[in-house]
Image: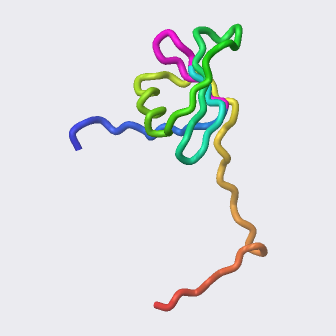
Amino acid sequence: MSGPYIDPMKLCQGQVWKQGREYIRIVRLERLEVEYKSMPNLGNKEGTKIVTSKKDFCRLLKGAHLLQSSKTPATARPADDAGESSVKLPA
């Protein structure tokens, strides 16, 4: 490996990113597509809605900084033993 390790970005609907002089808010997040709103400032909420592929959106965010996240990733909960079904695989 030639470069430093970089954590993969976690995209969530409602996140706000700052890229240069513009703010980018994720409006809709799907498996292969992202709808986002590009705004010159966060105060007036006016901006342009754009739909693009997730790959192109991640390229757009290169070098951007996450400002806030409206949703926090779900934490892993221990599974209930009563609700689990176990399957034995042949050895």
Residue 28 against residue 50 in the figure, above or below: below
Question: Which of the 4 image quadrants contains residue 2?
Answer: top left
The furthest residue to the left: 2
Task: State the colouring used for the structure image.
Answer: rainbow
Q: Is residue 6 left or right of residue 90?
A: left
The furthest residue to the right: 82
Q: Is residue 33 left or right of residue 13?
A: left
State whether the magenta stretch is mostly helix, strand or loop: strand
Residue 85: image x %, image y %? 70, 79
Which residue corresponds to the image point at 67% horizontal and 46% vertical from the top-left? 74
> Does the magenta portion include 40?
no
Q: Which residues are magenta?
A: 14-23
Residue 65 against residue 84 in the figure, above or below: above
Residue 15: image x %, image y %? 62, 29
Residue 72: image x %, image y %? 67, 38
Image quadrant for the N terminus?
top left
Which residue corresponds to the image point at 50% horizontal and 9% vertical from the top-left? 21
Nearer to us in this view, 82 or 90: 90
Residue 78 against residue 8 in the figure, above or below: below
Which residue corresponds to the image point at 65% horizontal and 12% vertical from the top-left? 42
- Label count reads 0
Residue 90: image x %, image y %? 50, 91
Which residue corresponds to the image point at 52% horizontal and 34% vertical from the top-left? 52
Nearer to us in this view, 49 or 60: 49
Question: Which of the 4 image quadrants contains residue 67?
Answer: top right
Q: Is residue 4 left or right of residue 77?
A: left
Q: Is residue 18 left or right of residue 74?
A: left
> Does the magenta portion include 15?
yes
